[in-house]
Image (cartoon, rainbow, N blue to C red):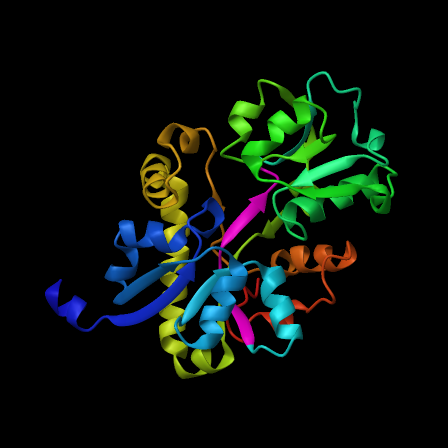
Amino acid sequence: MPARAASAATVRVGSVPVQSYMQPYYGNAAHIFQNAGIDLQITSLANSSAIVAALVGGSLDVGIGSPTGIAQARLRGVPLKIFGPGGMFSADMPSLSPLMVANDSPIKKVGDLTGKTIATDLLKSVPQIGTILMLEKSGVDPASIHWLELPFPSMPAALVRGAIDAATIGEPALSAARATCRGLGDYTAAIAPHYFISAWFATDSWLATNLDLAHTLVHAIEATSVWASQHFAESVDVLAQYSKLPHDVIAHMGQSTFGTKLEPPQVEALVDAAFKTGMTTGTVPANELIATGFADSN
């Protein structure tokens, strides 16, 4: 073990200590990256945009970010490519992302939301994208909606007092919200049955210079995805340590899903949905967004 540590390749990664971005933390806790000969040094940042900025600025080697954010950076001329699978949405998993209304609300279905006020934690992100697709499918013109940015913990009380009509409530507020609010549907499922919420990325130059290391890193990432699927209790402990959320809240959040292969349609789904809903200025096909040799060929 000391000899391996002495020859370990250092990789500086930027991530966010939230469920879909937890692979670096899980992999280090399980010694997967160390056993692959990688000294993975994690920097926790606020969001994907901060990670992109740090990577381009040279303080990081690789990052984990939203495929949409990575695509938009590439459209601006920033030479980024996806090379590893991250957190996924899968319709096979229990719904953890409902669009909610107060229990006593007269709104019974998504089609009743015309002209209403909907709160989301971050505009132009997955909750708003998925909700717009839900609205369109139900015959509601999204242009009629008044959007409000509101933290998750503030949403249930705002619904109960009638300050907003609906909200995309997520954890750590979702479990408690079920006492006073009910769901209209899962906004994440409106995007696609399976898609990447996050993915590992790097600059074209880093990948070209460190190609063998990148492939070694991907094998460790895939092994971490498998570990996370088989070690829920341990993953709860790690997430609690880094996210600072209460342990019992995390235990009720359900198990995260992580990809074990980089399938192009699952990378494109969120990117295309963001463009379709007017949240982004353009789209990037998977063959331009995924680094050569890293996409699953099956």
Where, quadrant-wise, is the N terminus in this rendering? bottom left
Q: Main secondary structure of the magenta part?
A: strand
Q: Position of residue 240 (x, y in %)?
A: 35, 39
Q: Nearer the viewer, residue 217 or 39?
A: 39
Q: Nearer the viewer, residue 142 or 287?
A: 142
Q: Is residue 90 left or right of residue 212?
A: right
Residue placed at 39% from the left, 79% from the top? 210
Q: Count up the numbered dots.
A: 0
In the picture provided, is 223 more to the left or to the right than 98? Answer: left
State the residue lying farthest toward the left.
2
Q: Is residue 24 left or right of residue 5?
A: right
Q: What residue is at 37 percent from the left and 52 percent from the top?
A: 224
Q: Quadrant of residue 96?
A: top right
Name the residue: 37% across, 36% down. 232
Residue 39: x and y in percent read 26, 65
Which corner quadrant of the image does residue 148 belong to? top right
The C terminus lies in quadrant: bottom right
Q: Point out the stretch of residues depicted in magenta.
A: 80-92
Residue at 66% x, 55% y is: 270
Q: Is residue 28 above or below residue 2?
A: above
Q: Is residue 20 above or below residue 78?
A: above
Towards the viewer: 212 or 56: 56
- Any magenta on residue 275? no
Task: For residue 136, say whether it is visible.
Answer: yes
Quarter of the image for residue 37 reads bottom left
- Residue 84 seen in the figure: no
In the displayed structure, does residue 151 sit left or right of residue 164? left
Observer-nearest of 141 and 64: 141
List x then y, in percent, for residue 268.
Answer: 66, 60
**Residue 228 horizontal/vertical position (percent):** 39, 45
